[in-house]
Image (cartoon, helix red, strand yellow):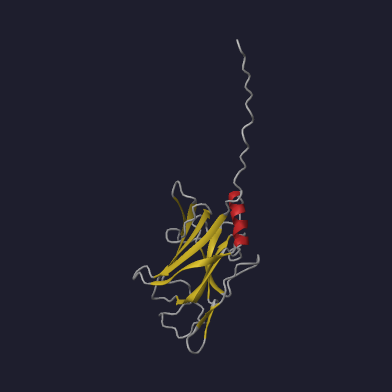
């Protein structure tokens, strides 16, 4: 009788894939929900430093860092006497980054007590099983009566009007309304908000692995 001794070697240690990385990108659509006329349809810039802090705070279940507000401003462009528009560069660096000139903001967090219309101003999470990305769909409606103090008709002759918007940003909650961190910034041709029109903003933020990349 012959004995055979077999020694099992240790299984090969498989290192975790630490090179995947995350990509964050955004897309904004601004339009009239009644006529469906589209005013703006473009990608936006991400403030990666502030966004990374917000992601860490969110998964650590902290009381700050989550998306709370949409801010509107009128300082993102300049128009010369011939009508040529010059677009400034979106602000994406520095922990104190902000819009160039904020003139209005509102809560779009449907879990927040500061949000007065959670049906039309909300954040929806969208994910399809088997994919490597998840979308945050931020919906914001500027109703006929907001902001207060706007002009009656969308026929202004100056792009410097308080509510002729040319920049929008999403901001985190950091404990005080209107004092959060800039997470995204988009600059576009001026769009007037007036009493006679509704404006709908659909702001999509896609968070995904760099594996099997899918554009938003």
Residue at the image point whose x is 61% and y is 39% from the top: 14
Q: Is residue 134 above or below residue 192?
A: above
Q: Is residue 6 above or below residue 130?
A: above
Q: Is residue 212 above or below residue 150?
A: above
Q: Is residue 53 above or below residue 88?
A: above
Residue at the image point whose x is 57% and y is 56% from the top: 66
In the image, 208 versus 110, the foreground residue is 208
Residue at the image point whose x is 46% and y is 71% from the top: 146
Residue 26: x percent and y percent?
50, 62
Residue 187: x percent and y percent?
52, 73
Residue 38: x percent and y percent?
39, 71
Q: Relative to residue 209, is residue 157 drawn left or right?
A: left
Q: Residue pushed farthest top?
A: 1
Residue at the image point whose x is 60% and y is 56% from the top: 54
In the image, 103 versus 128, the foreground residue is 128
Determine if residue 66 is in view: yes
Quarter of the image with the N terminus in it: top right
């Amino acid at each position: 009788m012959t004995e055979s001794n077999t020694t099992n070697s240790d299984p090969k240690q498989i290192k975790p894939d630490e090179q995947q990385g995350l990509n964050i990108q955004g897309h904004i659509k601004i339009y009239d929900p009644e006529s469906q006329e589209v005013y703006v349809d473009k990608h936006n810039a991400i403030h990666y430093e502030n966004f990374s802090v917000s992601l860490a705070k969110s998964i650590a279940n902290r009381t700050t860092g989550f998306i709370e507000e949409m801010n509107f401003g009128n300082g993102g462009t300049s128009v010369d006497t011939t009508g040529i528009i010059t677009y400034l560069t979106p602000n994406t660096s520095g922990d104190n980054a902000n819009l160039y000139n904020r003139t209005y903001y509102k809560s779009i967090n449907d879990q927040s007590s500061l949000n007065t219309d959670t049906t039309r101003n909300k954040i929806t999470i969208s994910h399809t099983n088997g994919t490597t990305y998840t979308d945050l769909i931020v919906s914001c409606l500027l109703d006929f009566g907001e902001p207060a103090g706007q002009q009656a008709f969308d026929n202004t002759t100056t792009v410097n009007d308080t509510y002729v918007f040319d920049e929008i940003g999403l901001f985190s909650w950091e404990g005080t309304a209107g004092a959060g961190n800039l997470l995204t910034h988009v600059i576009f041709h001026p769009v007037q908000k007036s009493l006679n029109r509704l404006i709908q903003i659909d702001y999509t933020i896609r968070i995904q692995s760099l594996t099997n990349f899918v554009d938003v």
